Image: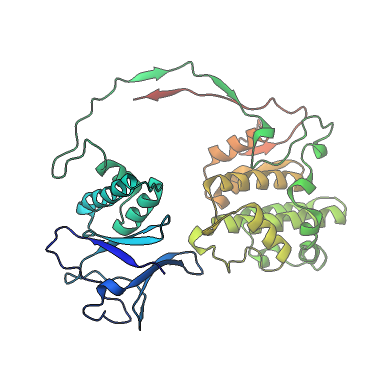
Amino acid sequence: MPIIEEIVTKSSNSKAVIVDFENGKIEPGQENTLKTGMYKDKECREFVSISSEKVLYTGDVCSDEEYTSFIMVHNEENNTTVGIQGVILHRQAREVIMNVYKFMKEEAQSGIKIPISRYRERVLAATGISKCTYTRITSKEYVYGQPPPVRKKKCETSVENAPVQTVQEEDSLYRPKINRDASTRDGVYDLDDVIPNGVLDTLIPQASAVLNSGDSVDEYQLTPFCTDSIKKILSLNTPEEIKVRNIAIFFYINYLIKFMNTPFKNITKRYVACDISQEVNRHILDNFCVYTQNGRTRPIHMKDKCLCYIIVLAAIAKEYEVNVALLSKDLKIGLKKAVEISKILAFNTSSKDKSIVTLNLPLPAPVTFNSKRKMK
């Protein structure tokens, strides 16, 4: 492990004080013999470990007036570390940042250059300030204790002739694949492109139980949109095989709606989107989450992708007619947004009921947006 070669303090008369770790206090006179290193735990969180000849010190640093706070900067070029003194308070974050930049300048003069982002990440983590605050207090205009400079208000400008942008289906990263050359409505969207057969087949037993055993749909505690849709499917005069397939589609939609309504903080590694089918659970998590180094995330655009898939699936299962008003309530979104997404998917609003969208041939032209906004 690298040895602490230098401790930077505010003045030469200041005595270096090592923070108190949960394993115990450092023995007097042993400050300069400590060894330190940067490590990561199983959750990829970085932490500093300091050890003497006999004891390993680890744990969280507790703020106390008796101790001095340091930022530990690790130089990857020569594998050394330096402790930079700084009071970790929001109002004094600028002083800490300036100390770090001073250290960077000295390193650059000696021929060692490290990306500034490495230092910025350490400063943000140590001080607890945001990136916006970091940028503000490091700007030349910032002077501590004085109000920010007054900026002149720009005159209001109206932009009326903004360029028209055409939205192309093939450019979308989250819309299902569309076939604009299809001669029938069944050929516009392919069910296999949205849900693979092997995934949907795992929900067939549950759908068959609803159809054959006479089970009430209400017993399954589905969302209102799915419950209402399945009841209408049961009342139609269609072959049983098609009914079972369409009911299975709405069971999938139900799990997808509940997944999107689940708070993101609850979607942990142990979270289960579907408890009756591992294939459905895996398909939802793989297609509506993004995996990063820090784990599973669900960006905002994934909700748009979810809405697109639900509208297309519901249309396939309900003769290409969808009640977006009821769907928007289940997804807790505005009706206007649901209608706009439907138009992007080549659906039209019904002339009798604006909350109903249908897929008709010939398909409408790709949606165009005429951006008109006011700039202030």
Seen at 83% across and 34% down, the residue is 184
Quadrant of the rendered image containing residue 139: top left
Front residue (pair 219, 150): 150
- Give percent across and percent down for residue 266: 51, 64
- Give percent across and percent down for residue 196: 78, 53
Quadrant of the rendered image containing residue 156: top left
Name the residue furthest bottom. 54
Quadrant of the rendered image containing residue 348: top right
Seen at 78% across and 63% down, the residue is 202
Q: Classify 266 as above or below 343.
A: below
Front residue (pair 361, 88): 88
- Give percent across and percent down for residue 200: 77, 57
Is 168 placed left or right of 24 in the picture? right
> Is residue 227 something one can see in this rendering?
no
- Give percent across and percent down for residue 363: 74, 28
Seen at 80% across and 68% down, the residue is 213
